[in-house]
Amino acid sequence: MQERTFHIITFGCQMNVHDSQWLGGALRARGFAEAPLEDAQVVVVNTCSVREKPEQKVMSALGRIRQVTGGDARVLVGVAGCVAQQLGTAFFEKEPQVRLVAGSDGIGAAPAAVERLLEEPDLRLSLLDFTDSYVEREAGAPGPANPVAYVNIMQGCDNFCTYCIVPYTRGRQKSRASGAILDDCRAALENGAREITLLGQNVNAFGRDKHGDGTSFASVEYVQLTGQPGIELVIGRQLSTDVLQSLSAYSYSDGYVAELMNANYSEYRVVDLDGDGRKDIFLLRFEAEQPQGIAELYRWQAGQMEREKEAYLTAGASLVKRILTGNLMKDIPAVFVSSAYEDTGLVTDVFAFQNGVFQSVTMREAESPVSTVRSYYVYASDIDGDGLIELPQILPLPSAEESDENDSAISWYNLDLDGRSLPKLTTYHSFSGGWFLKLPDRWQNQFCITRGAEADGVHGYAFSQWEDGRRTELIFTIYAFSGENRNESASADGRFILAEKGDITYAAKLGTGKWAEELSADRLRDMFHFIHIDWNSGET
């Protein structure tokens, strides 16, 4: 058996794997060499508490170690990780070879403990106390080059969910200093990493605990900004508990990390707005001293990220509800920003880059901006599937007797670069029912809706012609049936099924007027669609 050799057995999560990799590197830096189990002077079992039968697996591993080593007292056996944190010094009674027990926070002191235990053969050590903050570990010998690297950013959790043992085995949440994280990321890049995974029990809460320095990662994206070989990252950071956030872009090439840009922001998107095949960075910023939100565009030009002249959001636009990227016109990409407007409605600002100029299409003329304000939370969408983004305009109905106040007719239109409206189609949205209809153009302002028409006790939406200030001929009625016999009811008394969703069957019945004669079951099915949840929820 060679002296100063080690072997590590790992159970559980990727953080455990990373801890074992670090421990191996730290031991190598102290002069140890990795070896097979039968040749190891030091054996460490790094344990996990959340997998099936964790204690049995650990005891089985210790039994195998005892069998392979013959129970040789000269072999130092340690147990680390979550099960070690749970059982603690009970391992000393269970296995005579175990002389080191290191919990989740104690593993950082394990390399020094191993050397001390080798010098004092009769000593046993337990490292089970939780630390008050994240303690940086000693540097270890670098491992082999790997395109994938893992970096710890925090440990523990403050949530104490009833089903979860993590707060008891990993302790309370402790965020790592952002500078140390960036140092590890740089080291990983220098060691050949092309992908970095940030590790922690609750990474989305990083930086927000009392141990953090106030910095949390809002986002990390791999992008192509420069069109040059290498790795490029866009990192959004929350710098405080306030709205303030900081965005940085970095490039890594030939062993060097360079910062491409840094700016404060409220929201951002990475999008190729100028159509050159490279991604641009679109920023929104709301400042207390500014009456309007500010939009900025950063593009790679002449060897640097160039900031274009800023543009502005509509006055009164406040909380951003949705940001959509898509085509304004053919081959003209744009960003559509929908924001709450004066606490009563919604407004959409459209930004594009054309003829070398970053501009707001809707605020192009400051004195007479294009109004996209509406009272309903209906979002810009490619409603007709033509690859262009349409904007909605709420239409008053001539009559909507007993109709749901949240249901409405909507005129959809495109904008050109001059802010001129280009009408596309009209729809009727039943937000309460979860469906909408694409309506013939000539129906605009010539139909009305009555909610309350019944079939088998089910309320329906009756669409009728509107002429000379009154409701005239019935065009069709739409129903929603539920229950075990819904399909039978939907197909009875001249009705036909439009579509099914979940436990609801939607059906229709044609009227007898001249407009009804122009329709058919197939035509009405083509007109009927379900509302995507993001159209009226604000989700991106």
Image (cartoon, grey):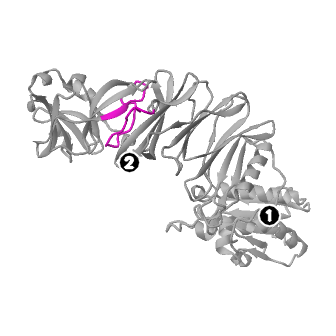
Image coordinates of residue 490 in percent, x first then y, are: 17, 38
Dividing the picture into quadrants, the one containing residue 399 is top left
- Image check: 402 left or right of 503? left
Q: Which residue is mark 1?
A: 43
Q: Which residues are magenta?
A: 366-393
Prevailing SS of the magenta stretch: loop
Find disc 2 in the rendering and name its residue: 342
Which residue is found at the position 35% from the left and 40% from the top? Answer: 378
487, 433: nearer the viewer? 433
Label 1 close to label 2 by CB (< 8 Å): no
Position of 365 compared to 41: left or right?
left
Label 1, secondary structure: give it. Answer: strand
Q: Quadrant of residue 34?
A: bottom right
What residue appears at the point 30 percent right and 26 percent down from the top-left corner? 425
> In the rendered image of this protein, does residue 157 appear above or below residue 348?
below
Q: Residues within 10 Å of mark 2 (few under 14, many from 20)?
A: few
Specify which label sits upstream in the sequence, 1 or 2: 1
Which of the pair 415/401 is nearer the observer? 415
Q: What is the crowding at mark 1: few (fewer than 14 residues within 10 Å), some, or many (at least 20)?
A: many
Q: Is residue 145 above or below residue 442?
A: below
| Residue 107 sits inside the magenta stretch | no
Give me the residue at 33% from left, 40% from top: 374
Residue 368 inside the magenta-drawn segment: yes
Figure quadrant of residue 530? top left
Q: Name the one closer to the observer, 225 or 290.
A: 290
Residue 361 at least partly seen: yes
Describe the element under mark 2 as helix, strand or loop: loop
- Residue 241: image x %, image y %? 57, 59
Q: Amino acid at mark 1?
A: Val
Q: Is residue 37 among what the camera can see?
A: no
User: Taking 273 as reference, is 535 above or below it?
Assistant: below
Three-letter amino acid code of the residue under disc 2: Glu
